[in-house]
Amino acid sequence: MIRVLLADDQPLVRAGLSALLNAEKDVEVVGVAADGAEALDLATELVPDVACLDIRMPKMDGIDVAARICGPDASPAVPVLILTTFDIDDYVFRALEAGVAGFLLKDSDPEEILRAIHHIAAGHGTLDRTLTRRIVAEYVERRRLRPVTATRGIDVLTARERDILLLLAQGMSNEQIAGALVVEVTTVKSHLARMLPKLGVQSRLQAAVWAYQNRVVTVDDAPR
């Protein structure tokens, strides 16, 4: 079972997400919070597999909570999916810096939200594809981040791994990558499992940022 913590200050949203997730055979909502402080307490107490956090909440916003539960000092770390109605750049930049595993808008299809939770629980990240070009690329440019050297360098990736990294950085899901490369989804997952350690990253979201930092993919390559 994938154990999920939900945090949102709107009762209707909490009820809707809880119903959506609990309807899945392999997902269980183990905690529900109405504000950031309660979310932090529950995340510390329950240590869920995934914490789905809203951004704007009373007492503490979702990104501040994320920084506490999934940042480098968190032990044990709880993977975070930010679900919000706001696609404001600074929010997403803060979320990336906090170390979240994923970022989706609340108007995403239910299937996309469920897929994101499964991906994150499996150790992968996700990013709303419509945000990829504007967010990840601008995040790198605005912060003027220095290139991050891979554990053994980009040359250690196979040709297929490079293909997957390029498509991943464009915001494609595993299913979309499989379709583009005409391979099975399990094949894509196997390549990702081998590729991420080579890049020195822990999630597909971090791999996307790495790809922009190191010019493996540029703004012009990303979807508009």
Image (tube, rainbow, N blue to C red):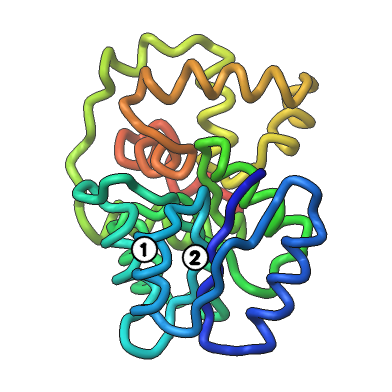
Q: Earlier in the sequence, mark 2 or mark 1?
A: 2
For mark 1, does the 10 Å Cα neighbourhood hold few (<14), some (14 to 19), or many (20 or more) residues?
Answer: many
Q: What is the distance, in whole Å, between disc 2 and disc 1 at their CAs?
A: 8 Å
On screen, 56 above or below 117? below
- Residue type highlighted by circle 1: Ala
Q: Position of residue 98 (x, y in %)?
A: 30, 59
Quarter holding residue 201: top left
The residue nearer to you, when weighing 216 against 107, is: 107
Residue 158 visible, this orientation: yes
Q: Residue at x 53, y 18 (%)?
A: 161
Q: Outermost residue toward the front?
A: 45
Instruction: Name which residue lies at 82% across and 60% down.
Output: 23
Q: Along the horizontal axis of the image, is 122 left or right of 43?
A: right
Describe residue 82's horizontal placement relative to residue 19 as left or right: left
Q: Locate the C terminus by quadrant.
A: bottom right
- The residue that appears at 47% across and 62% down in the rendered structure is 134
Name the amino acid type tagged 2.
Answer: Ile
Q: Quadrant of residue 22?
A: bottom right
The answer to whether 108 is drawn above or below residue 75 in the figure is below
Q: Is residue 177 left or right of residue 161?
A: right
* Residue at the (78%, 21%) spot, across then down: 184
- Front-most of residues 25 and 176: 25
Tell me the element at label 1. helix
Residue 199 placement (x, y as % from top left)? 35, 24
Label 2 belongs to which residue? 82
Q: SS at mark 2?
A: strand
Q: Relative to 80, does residue 32 appear above or below in the rendering?
A: below
Contact? badges 2 and 1 (CB < 8 Å): yes
Query: Residue 21 appears at what percent x and percent y?
Result: 72, 61
* Mark 2 neighbour class, 10 Å CA radius: few under 14, some 14 to 19, many 20 or more: many
Q: Which residue is mark 1?
A: 95
